[in-house]
Image (spheres, rainbow, N blue to C red):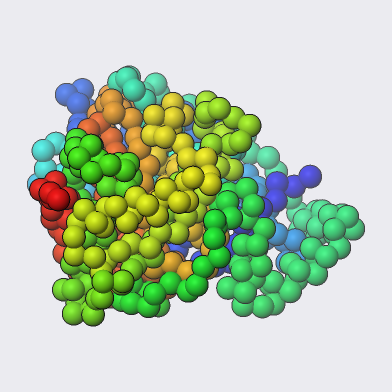
Amino acid sequence: MPDRLSALDASFLYLEDHATPMHVGGVAIFERPRSGFGYAQLLDLIGARLAFLPRYRQRVLEVPGHLARPVWVDDVDFDLNYHVRRSALPQPGSDEQLFDLVARLMSRRLSPERPLWEAYFIEGLAGDRVALVTKTHQSVVDGVGTIELGQLILDPTPAEPEPFEDIWTPRREPSRTQLVLDAISEGVQRPGEVVENVRSAANDAVASAGKFAETVGGVASALRTLVSPAPPGPLNVRVSSGRVFSVVRTRLEDFRKIRAAHGGTVNDVVLAAVTGALREWLLSREEQLTPNTTVRALVPLAVRDAETAEYSTPALIGNQVAAYLVDLPVGEPNPVLRLQHVGHAMAEHLDSGRPVAARGLLKVGGFAPATLHSLGARAAGSLSGRIFNVMVTNSPGPQVPMYAGEARLVEMFPVMPLMRTQALAIGVTSYHGGVYFGLNGDRKAAFDVDLLAGMIEESLEELKGAHW
């Protein structure tokens, strides 16, 4: 039988347009070792591990007449050098130059004629650093058969990559006749699906994706409550094709101190810091806030399977990401009360679910945040953008150094995709004592994302100094 895309994976392809590329990104910054770490070594490292990720050598093939969803087929012309690209900043390259490049890279769609991922090895950063920017389509990473590339190439100990010799042999691509025969064969068993596939091809992509989203089931658990549309505001506009990207660097110890002083979880403190920043950002735009004004955040979280005590392998993650809606109290001027409101809202959701504590996620192995952010984006992409204002994903990472070959990972920033009517998406990852925010914004509607990034730092400082 053909390796057919799931309804959810197909919906990401149908939803995509020039303004809303459906890929998740990551920016990993490495300290170059004395022995060096160059493009050739990165090629060896990635090439040797692609055997564990067969989806990264496959492309999507449409079925004639849209009689069935597309299928995954081996790319007979697979070229690792096409997918792993080399770039450089004018030395000494600044972080601002790097993040401007990241914004431009993330605004470009992946080629549908090739496997749906790219990686950029960027040299020239000040301080003898290099960066790896990855882009992976949401249809690729399901957490079951395929994890995110960034998770696979990082190890807890340094080791020089072995020279890579590619001995992979692709399977022959099915003919158009075979694709049609397979679709007809499946249609005999499920005739209603053939009608729906043809109808989806004829109708608007958004309508078809809405139908597909009804079948999500395993990737994003159902929302815990029925909700009204999200509050209107500057975060919900039709996005353009341009992007801006900014980051925030904070320390995990600060979040832990705030949690110890005021209760809740580290994730509650993260959301409270974002809430305070959004409050100041809205005020800077002369938005009218009342004590009851809220911004609704979609917060994807990993949950534990009812039949499993804890995660033991990455393969268990894929079906266990739940999407929660949290109304962030941006109208509340008191930072401690904002934290309490957020904590209560999260507790109500999690009391009825099976949240996985950070220590449980860290047992998954590898650099799991890369995969968990991708799964969070899948959860968001399966839902209507009308019910939330902003997506905020937060995934704990290892608190020990990680390496790509012999190069030590210094910082890691997620780059979450934008929905059609969401001007801002925030990804958060903790790693080796740091908490790193990646803010991806629409270049028109969120042109001042750097201002918002600074406000997150100020909001955290406000929480640190807050007293009853």
Residue at 22% in and 60% down: 276
* Residue closest to the eye, 248 or 65: 248
Image-quadrant location for residue 409: top left
Q: Is residue 75 left or right of residue 339?
A: right
Which quarter of the image is occupied by the N terminus?
top right
Image-quadrant location for residue 404: top left
Compared with residue 423, is residue 286 higher up or lower down, i.e. above or below? Answer: below
Residue at 83% in and 65% down: 192
Q: Is residue 463 left or right of residue 426?
A: left
Residue 408 position within the rendered picture, expressed as x and y whole percent measured from the top left: 25, 29
User: Can the viewer see residue 121?
Assistant: no
User: Can the viewer see residue 35?
Assistant: yes
* Residue closest to the eye, 358 or 183: 358
Compared with residue 238, is residue 123 higher up or lower down, i.e. above or below? Answer: above
Residue at 88% in and 55% down: 189
Image-quadrant location for residue 109: bottom left
* Residue closest to the eye, 208 or 232: 232
* Residue closest to the eye, 329 or 356: 329
Q: Is residue 195 left or right of residue 438?
A: right
Q: Is residue 31 left or right of residue 374?
A: left
Residue at 43% in and 72% down: 230
Question: Furthest residue to the right?
Answer: 188
Question: Furthest residue to the front?
Answer: 468
Residue 98 position within the rendered picture, expressed as x and y whole percent measured from the top left: 21, 52
Residue 64 position within the rendered picture, expressed as x and y whole percent measured from the top left: 74, 65
Residue 130 position within the rendered picture, expressed as x and y whole percent measured from the top left: 22, 39
Total marks drawn? 0
